[in-house]
Amino acid sequence: MHWFEAEAPIRKKTAVAFGILVGLIALSALIALVRGDWVAAATNTVIAALAGGLSLRFRTAICDPYVNTVVRMEALAAGDLDSPIAYTDYQDCVGRMTRAMFTFRDTAKAQIESAAEQAAVVATLRSSLDSLTRGDFTADIHADFPPAYVELKNNFNAALTSLRGLIGSVMESTSAITTGSTEIAQASEDLARRTEANAASLEQTSAAVSQIEGRLKSTAGAAERTVTRADGAIQSIATGRVTTGEAVQAMTRVSDSAKGIDSVIEGLDKIAFQTRVLAMNAAVEAGRAGEAGRGFAVVADLVSALAMRAEEEAGRARDQLTATQSDIGAAVEMVQKVDVAFADISDDVGEVHVLLAEMASANEAQASAITEISGAIGAMDQATQQNAAMVEETSAAARSLTNEVGTLAAQASQFNVGQAGSAPRVPPAPRSVRVNARDSAATRHWDRPEAFVDADGWATL
């Protein structure tokens, strides 16, 4: 069955199909003949003959158009675009295939014509591109292109015109760039010298600031030591005031003790007076006794004399004690004056201590500020040295740029861009350059009327 469906030609398929049909009819006639049914046998025989004839006719009507169409299709695939295509008026599958073949043929012819036009266009482009590879930018396309490729021709010519303008602008700009790079190199060298001078000045300033910092630190240390000494003096004065207070208290106690001694002396004076009175009474009684009381009278006289001497000694002791009390009062007053003087000295030393502390704090703040200034100057010195190195690199880069621009000019001169000025010049993009209006050396090159310097010192060209 697979062979019949996929491998057998259409003529053989129809022959097999119609052969089976005629065979079945002939078999029916043979069966009728065997049964003796002559009418059925004759009828089936006639039918079989008619079926065979019709099969041959149907085979020709069905298979020939298909086979011929397949053969023409193969020839069309092989490139035969001139032979006629039959059966296009059929309305069956053969007609549909032949009309599709007719369309395929027209499309193939159009593709061949388009390929020929494309080959001509490619050849023209190849010629112009070969000229471009040799540096000739005047190889415009003047040949007529098919309508489909006119835009390509116009774009190519426009691109070539732009390239001519660009290369012409490059050739015109190389001279200006060379001049500008030379001036930049000179300005960079001048800036490098000024930067080196600034670096030397900053180094000297840094050394001077370092000396000032050392002196301020030394002064701050001396002030701190003075504050420490003042603290010690304040403590010593406080100790002295405590000592004077204790001395005043001790003298007060001595004065109180002297007052007690005065009371004792007064009591002794009274006792001596009473003793003298008793001695006088004893002498009176001894005189009354006569000769028997004479010895008692002598004793009474001695007791009286002793009492008088005791009174005298008590008076002398009272006078001495009074003088001592007066001296103690004077000493207490002097010690109190010393305490007041110590208090004044303590206040003055306290104020000196505050002033010295403020001086030490100010010296520390100044030393800290000088340290920050020294660090800032060091950073400025380092930045200046880095700037000097960068300026040297910029100068070297400017010199290298000059050399590269010379090389670019030499390479650009190899291109043929036609007559000078024939190509449109590409306007340069605006550029901004920082200038210093106070430096005539930096502004002497900006004499173009279209240059504008704004308030920040940026020149827009």
Image (cartoon, rainbow, N blue to C red):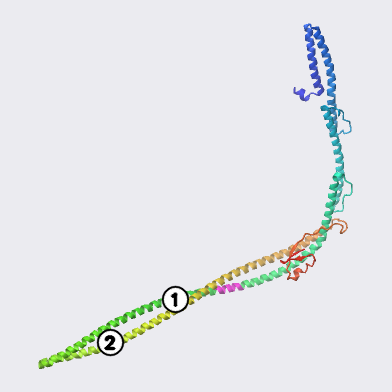
Dots 2, 1 in contact, CB < 8 A: no
- Whether residue 299 can be seen here: no
Q: Main secondary structure of the magenta part?
A: helix
Residue 86 image-quadrant placement: top right
| Foreground residue among 140 and 84 | 84
Image disc number at residue 434: none
Residue 235 image-quadrant placement: bottom left
Task: Quadrant for the C terminus, please.
Answer: bottom right
Q: Going by the image, does 175 lie left or right of 291?
A: right
Q: CA distance from mark 2 to mark 1?
A: 43 Å
Residue 435 image-quadrant placement: bottom right
Q: Going by the image, does 257 lie left or right of 4?
A: left
Query: Mark 1, residues whose alpha carbon is within 10 Å: few (<14), some, or many (≥20)?
Result: many
Query: Mark 2, residues whose alpha carbon is within 10 Å: few (<14), some, or many (≥20)?
Result: many
Residue segment shown in magenta: 208-217
The residue that label 2 is drawn on is: 318
Task: Tell me if residue 209 is in the magenta stretch.
Answer: yes
Image disc number at residue 234: 1
Give the secondary structure at mark 1.
helix
Mark earlier in primary sequence (2, 1): 1
**Does residue 169 sit above or below 264 in this rendering?**
above
Task: Tell me if residue 344 is in the magenta stretch.
Answer: no
- At which x and y percent is residue 83? 89, 31
**Does residue 347 sit above or below 283 in this rendering?**
above
- At which x and y percent is residue 450? 79, 64
Which residue type does callout 2 highlight?
A: Arg
**Does residue 31 sit above or below 292 in this rendering?**
above
Please name the residue shown 53% across and 72% down the image: 361
Which residue type does callout 1 highlight?
A: Ile
